[in-house]
């Protein structure tokens, strides 16, 4: 949820624990987290990152060459946002249904989403579905060796209408 909040989304857990039965129940059979935001904040963020990137351009006289100076982080953020836009990810606003799981069980959870009758209706209603897989991996030190500390790593897969059979 922290990753979505950093992008300006309001998030809430909609998965419920059913006492007595000792089971978890997802909203509509496939949603663990809902995230919503208006469209404008992300477009404003893209514009801010673009301006930041443009300030890093440097012209080399006589060579007709423009290059980015010290723009690694700025370019990375800008490129990530543009990639999300081009891939059709609903990171620019709207409502996202998120299914969370371990990275090793993403295939089973994808099948669960594709089998849920409400999932295709969610997409037809203008919502987006994302499958977030998580695992923990050793932190790699500057010398290239793995440390004792573990860090979380995520993989996000966007569920599209074309995936439904």
Image (cartoon, helix red, strand yellow):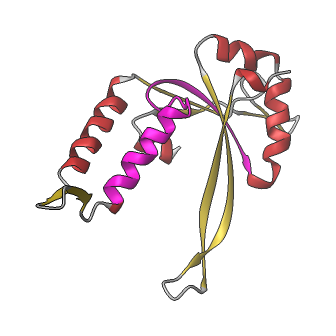
Q: How many marks?
A: 0
In the image, 97 versus 12, the foreground residue is: 97
Image coordinates for residue 24, horizontal then vertical, percent: 79, 36
Query: Residue 34 placed where, x, y %?
Result: 58, 29
Q: Is residue 109 above or below residue 76?
A: above
Q: x%, y% of residue 60?
A: 15, 62
Q: Residue at x 86, y 25 (%)?
A: 115
The image quadrant where one finds the C terminus is: top right
| Residue at the image position 69 percent from the left and 26 percent from the top | 160
Q: In the displayed orientation, state which residue is furthest to the left.
A: 61
Q: Position of residue 23 (x, y in %)?
A: 84, 37
Nearest the viewer among 147 and 142 is 142
Q: Residue furthest right?
A: 21
Which stretch did the figure color magenta?
73-102
Residue 19 in view, yes or no: no
Q: Residue furthest front?
A: 62
Quadrant of residue 20 within the rendered picture? top right
Q: Position of 101 compared to 82: left or right? A: right
Which image quarter: residue 164? Answer: top right
Q: Dividing the picture into quarters, in which one does residue 66 lie? A: bottom left
Residue 99 painted magenta: yes
Left or right: 95 as drawn, with respect to 63: right
Instruction: Note whether 46 is above or below 57 in the view shown.
Output: above
Residue 75 in sight: yes
Per the image, is 81 magenta?
yes
Residue at (33%, 24%) from the top-left corner? 40
At 26% from the left and 59% from the top, the residue drawn is 68
- Left-right relation of 16 to 114: left
């Amino acid at each position: 949820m922290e990753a979505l909040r950093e992008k300006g989304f309001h998030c809430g857990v909609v998965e419920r624990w059913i006492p007595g039965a000792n089971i978890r129940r997802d909203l509509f059979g496939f949603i663990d987290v809902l995230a919503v935001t208006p469209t404008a904040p992300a477009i404003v963020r893209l514009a801010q990152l673009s301006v930041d990137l443009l300030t890093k351009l440097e012209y080399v006289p006589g060579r007709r060459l423009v290059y980015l100076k010290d723009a690694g982080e700025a370019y990375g953020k800008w490129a990530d946002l543009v990639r999300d836009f081009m891939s059709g990810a609903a990171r620019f606003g709207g409502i996202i249904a998120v299914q969370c799981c371990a990275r090793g069980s993403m295939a089973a959870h994808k099948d669960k989403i594709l089998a849920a009758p409400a999932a295709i209706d969610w997409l037809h209603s203008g919502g987006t579905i994302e499958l977030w897989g998580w695992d923990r991996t050793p932190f790699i030190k500057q010398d290239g060796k793995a440390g004792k500390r573990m860090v979380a790593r995520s993989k996000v897969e966007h569920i599209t209408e074309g995936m439904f059979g």
